[in-house]
Image (cartoon, helix red, strand yellow):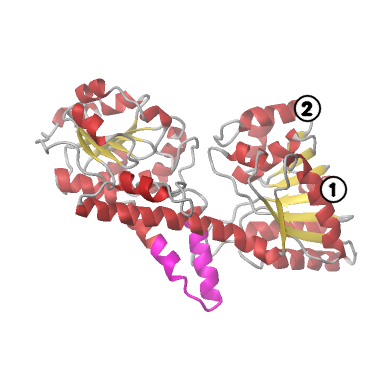
Amino acid sequence: MKITIIGTGYVGLVTGACLAETSNDVLCVDVDEKKIALLNSGGVPIHEPGLKELIDRGRASGRLKFTTDLVASVAHGDVQFIAVGTPPDEDGSADLQYVLAAARNIGAHMQDFKVVVDKSTVPVGTAKRVHDVIADELSRRHVRHDFSVVSNPEFLKEGAAVQDFSRPDRIVIGIDSDKPGLRARESMKELYAPFNRNHERTLYMDVRSAEFTKYAANAMLATRISFMNELANLADRIGADIEAVRRGIGSDPRIGYDFLYAGAGYGGSCFPKDVRALVQTAAENGQELQILKAVEAVNDEQKHVLVDKIAQRLGVDLIDRTFAVWGLAFKPNTDDMREAPSRELIAALLKRGATVRAYDPVAIAEARRVFAIDLKDDPDAHSRLSFSKTPMDATEGADALVIVTEWTAFKSPDFTALKQALTAPLIFDGRNLYEPAAVAAQGIEYHSIGRPQSVEVQSVPHAIHAVQAG
């Protein structure tokens, strides 16, 4: 099939590359000339395991192409995927300007039947708005062409997106029951046939239900995370171990283990934005989603839990303190810094006068960019932030290690070398990577989320030389 992907961001690139892999003729279009030039030269603008290899194969076979030609993109694809960004507006609702601009371009240039697929995460009712925009453009041109607008939300986890697309647990398709809709259903069935070989994974439903399903799924997962974080904070107060609690409740098949890990809060491009958008959608329809408001509030507070633990241990004034920070991306296997907990943590440490040396396996370049923006009004704080080439480089002479992202590379460190590198054996772990008893056996003071402290508190000296070394 001939497929057009509008937007070469995270969702667009994964969708385009995976569909090209199943022998479709895919054209990806974007208005960002630099991004298209990068893709045409063999580069990839995002880090996602396995994606570059897919793109390279698609380009080599001729099945995957990239362009800025909007007119050509409409002519190319029988199926037009809209996979552009939907950033949050000032009131928390999804900003649909890019979605509607894509629809306007389709309506302005289409010459035959098109299946228009909303792949971007959009509020309920967006397919109707896309339909109306395309119809208005056709009317303005005084032409009539049948088309159908389909909702096909993505359920891709950053860091595992290629696998999620290639081996989906479900494919949600919202479609109209009119004649163009039935025609679109056949196209979508053919397109997704390679992903349904073992058993049928496609769930057909009405368009509004499909749009709602995406928001409901992300809201549910965000709720589980915030719920566990609240329990972890209570466990800190009552002396319980949240990891033992997690195993105890996760073993119940009605609950399960997924998304029950306590930590430093969720981030990324989906959960924060989608929770706010769903709250705003409810408000526009006269309903208050009290649980989701609490989910968001808990998450905002959770991003400060590590700073609070540091302040309780070392004091509010962190001048002359140096901290090694391991992990910058909001989750492992991505370089995505959008709403990452590390941004809140590092900003708070710098505001209290600390020096920070940070390390991440893949996100340092993106971290440099976002912190240049975050700290543009505070050059002094910006000067106290540096990025290290290795995890151990960051810890040399630091007063404490702070772990924010659960990269595999951090899960089995050389504790002997780590203890020697730090001016005092002190770890604040925002992802509960280690067993407290094992860390205590190394003589390291260990503060995690919702678990008993591992060793008796020791005095931690000020390390002027560590600031100079940073």
Q: Is residue 376 visible?
A: no
The x, y position of residue 90, in whole percent, is 49, 64
Three-letter code for the amino acid on which mark 2 is drawn: Ser
Task: Choose the circle earlier in sequence order: 2 or 1.
Answer: 2
- Between 188 and 28, the residue placed more toward the observer is 188
- Between 406 and 341, the residue placed more toward the observer is 406
Q: Residue at x 81, y 58 (%)?
A: 108
Could you tell me what secondary structure mostly forms the magenta stretch? helix
- Between 74 and 259, the residue placed more toward the observer is 259
Helix, strand or loop under label 2:
helix
Q: Is residue 184 visible?
A: yes
Helix, strand or loop under label 1:
helix
Direction from residue 215 to residue 378 in the image, left or right: left
Q: Is residue 281 magenta?
A: yes
Query: Magenta segment range?
Result: 272-295
Dot label at residue 75: 1
- Residue 436 in the image: above or below residue 285: above
Three-letter code for the amino acid on which mark 1 is drawn: Ala
List the residue tagged with mark 2: 61
